[in-house]
Image (cartoon, rainbow, N blue to C red):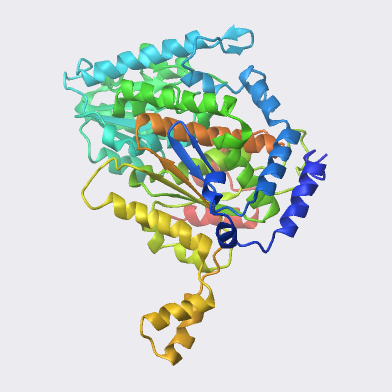
Amino acid sequence: MTNPLLGSPAWNALSDHAAATRDVQVRDLFAADVRRFDMFSITADGLLLDYSKQRVTADTLRLLRELWAAAGVPGMYARMRAGEEINHTEHRAVLHHALRSQSETPVMCDGRDVMPGVRRVLDHMRGFCDAIHSRRWRGAGGDVITDIVSIGIGGSDLGPRMATQALAAHHVRNVRVHYVANLDGADLATTLAMLLPRTTLFVIASKTFTTQETMQNARSARAWLTAALGEAAVARHFVAVSTHLAEVAAFGIDTANAFEFWDWVGGRFSLWSAIGLPLALAIGFENFSRLLEGGAAMDRHFDTAPLEENLPATLALLDVWNGNFLGAESRAVLPYSNSLGLLPRYLQQLEMESNGKAVGRDGRPVGHATSPVVWGEPGTNGQHAFYQLIHQSGKLIPCEFIAARAADFPLPGHHAKLLANCFAQSEALMRGRTLDEARAGLAAAGRPAAEIELLAPYQMFPGNQPSTTLLLPAITPFTVGQLIALYEHKTFALGALWHLNSFDQWGVEYGKQLAARLLPMIEGKTVVQDLDASTAGLIAACRKT
């Protein structure tokens, strides 16, 4: 069967509503209702979500909320929190929220409370961070550690990397954290070129300690270190985030310096676990704890806020409206914060790896569009790149603007201009400019009549481009925790609405299987055979060199 929602009364009512309101202009909705901002914005826990520039009316929201109820999203959320195996294709519970829990309430999985284990690992992380920051942990030659290199990939890299950049204003002194993920040797080589073996510590993040990209980088880092300091130095310059202690020990890492995480933690939801150790080393464990508190605050909000005041639910329903009923195929994420520059990349993995699927929880095609293509760049840089397309291509591209009221690096004269650009872009995308308005503007600038007629069509903007603006009070560990958890809950809610398992990633696994088959052919160890002509030709071309 397809998604049970497809063809349901709630779905059909939204389809009819979309057809009836297709020509509605948001600028006209503002003109007709001076209270539109108040009606279509939410303030919660210091965050402000303005979605008044979306192509929605009160009727749209009512129908979307009826769809939410018909999809049974609250029931699915209750199943997740109860420790049921909602990741049914991998037979796993989904309990990342437990990692940031501030409650004494047990979180059960397979009849056991996971919280004692969570607290034990957090204590282990706290002790290790203190040892590094107090300079009690020394390298093999007695030197203090000044540089941390995190080696991971995907969920073991993007979350901590993004948050480390986001919280640059909160970094501890005298410790620099670097990230290496790409299998291309350039990533590791250019990082190592800046470092000294005797003052560098590596954090190897791999649940199984077998991930191809991570372990190749780890072996190369190990060779770099031992060439300078000898084999015995590995135990003082490498730690692991893994559950496979035999592989950790075989690598030469003291298993006392292995940090555990669990099968009920999905990679792209694992920032809150020991995967976040490099982040904790960058910002200090107290700030890492504040990040966890921010995530827990968003958990409470999603769990208790009424639907009409619920931030993740509102963002999820707007994605459904724009994608399934208005036909948008992508969404631009536009942080007006250089510190949040990696947020679009992080959300690409979180949302597209979770919900970039066409097969539902019953193993059959869902029958409708699912995840949009997520893309973006920080403002104001993006304004000088792709905003032209958003403004005048005629493509429907919903936009998500994210900004902070206060600057994390308050240089005089910068932040007010940054906010002015952010708010101006969302206004321009909504309002547009008619042909008559373009002519009037050119006339006011003193252009001659012939030039006005020539230029006016080029200065006309369709407008009516939907956007939301999320305003944070500041970029702090707490608000970054809120922000990450907000998008996690939104991703979960969309999976429930689209009838998906948001927590597996079989498309990723297939490519890995093919790569393992091709590697010995590229290395010349086996005969090139049983391949399509293109793949065989590419391998042959590489083997000639």
Whether residue 182 appears in this view of the structure is no
Report the residue that reaches farthest toward the left: 142
497 shown above or below 281: below
**Image x and y of residue 41, in percent:** 53, 43
136 shown above or below 165: above
68 shown above or below 33: above
Considering the image in quadrants, where does the C terminus appear? bottom left
**Image x and y of residue 279, in percent:** 35, 29
Whether residue 41 appears in this view of the structure is yes
* Residue drawn at (55%, 50%) of the image: 36
Would you say 158 lies left or right of 365 here?
Answer: left
Q: Nearer the viewer, residue 35 or 241?
A: 35
* Residue drawn at (49%, 75%) of the image: 437
* Residue drawn at (63%, 17%) of the image: 83
Where residue 171 sits, quadrant-wise, is top left
Considering the image in quadrants, where does the N terminus appear? top right
Would you say 498 lies left or right of 199 here?
Answer: right
Q: Nearer the viewer, residue 115 or 318?
A: 318
Q: Nearer the viewer, residue 306 or 526?
A: 306
